[in-house]
Image: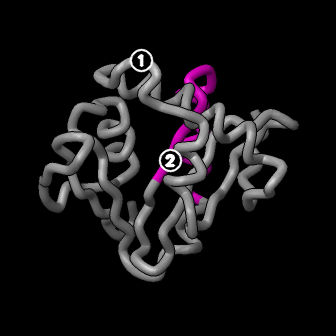
Amino acid sequence: MNILVREFEEADRDALRLLYVASRDAAFTWSAAGAHRPGDFDLHTEGERILVAAVGAEVLGFASIWEPDSFLHNLFVHPSALRQGIGRALLAQCGRYFTRPPTLKCLRANGGALRFYQAQGWCVLREGTGPDGPYLLMVLMAGG
């Protein structure tokens, strides 16, 4: 599979809105039905750098970074495309936008994402609780 990771273009917005809902519905099984809406993508990525992963013309994932803090805010892959290297490809391209060791928050309940990040070299710094429940603040260790 030839995965292209590129900068967000406005023409990607509708596909990413749908991908965001599908991914969150699949991963956040504890959320009520209908809790995720297409407009959430716009709210949750405002002011962030967005990278898009595509195979051919099909958008299959994205990552968004809050650059001032080297914070990986979102990384989502369409449920139909999990375990195909898309998340790893996105992470690899995010690195160029981090000016210090990057961090992210992973909801404790999202075991699949937690295992993915740990396999990519991310380590837990501390635990906390936010509006969506308990989370782990993670950092990418050097060489990760």
Q: Can residue 84 be seen in this view?
A: yes
Residue 118 at what x, y percent from top left? 31, 46
Q: Is residue 91 visible?
A: no
Q: Decide whether residue 52 is among the magenta residues.
A: no
For the C terminus, which image quadrant?
bottom left
Residue 89 at what x, y percent from top left? 61, 49
Please give the range of residues in magenta.
Answer: 74-92
Dot 2 lies on which element? strand
Q: Decide whether residue 86 is among the magenta residues.
A: yes
Q: Splitting the image into 4 quarters, where does residue 8 fall? A: bottom right
Coloring basis for residues:
one colour
Residue at 53%, 67% (x, y): give it. Answer: 95
Q: Splitting the image into 4 quarters, where does residue 49 fall? A: bottom right
Residue at 31%, 65% (x, y): give it. Answer: 141
Q: Is residue 93 above or below residue 111?
A: below
Q: Please give the label number shown on residue 33.
A: 1
Q: Please give the label number shown on residue 75.
A: 2
Q: Is residue 103 above or below residue 31?
A: below
